Image (cartoon, helix red, strand yellow):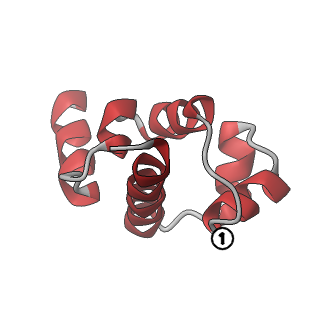
Amino acid sequence: MNYRSLNSIAATNIDSMRGATHESIEQLSANTNIPLSTLKARLARRYSYTLDEIELLARHWGIDGAGLLSPDFSATKALADKEGNER
């Protein structure tokens, strides 16, 4: 597996998390300190995510950064696991 395929997996999983959390791009940018223009370019898949950005997003959502790089990732399961751990 190469970096390009890992980035494609991460982009798909990040899209999935955004859909599951119903967060706007503006909210996500403000909450992660990733500049809005950078986030828009990443979401449009014009540029690859950096590992630091993936970690910032994972930390924001309270999930493991490695999960965002997994082809078996499920946003629903990640959020359910997070809620279970918070109880």
Assess disc 1: are there few (<14), some (14-19) or many (≥20) residues with their C-alpha within 10 Å of its C-alpha: few
- The mark total stands at 1
Q: Is residue 64 visible?
A: no
Please indicate whether residue 53 sits to the left or right of residue 87 in the image.
right
The percent coordinates of residue 3 (x first, y second) are 47, 43
Please indicate whether residue 58 sits to the left or right of residue 80 in the image.
right
Q: Is residue 35 above or below residue 21?
A: above
The percent coordinates of residue 77 (x first, y second) are 17, 52
The percent coordinates of residue 28 (x first, y second) are 64, 52
Q: Residue at x 71, y 55 (%)?
A: 39
Please indicate whether residue 28 sits to the left or right of residue 55 in the image.
right
Please indicate whether residue 60 sits to the left or right of residue 10 in the image.
right
Which part of the image, by quadrant, shows the C terminus?
top left
Q: Residue at x 27, y 49 (%)?
A: 79
Q: Residue at x 35, y 35 (%)?
A: 63
Residue bearing the label numbered 1: 44
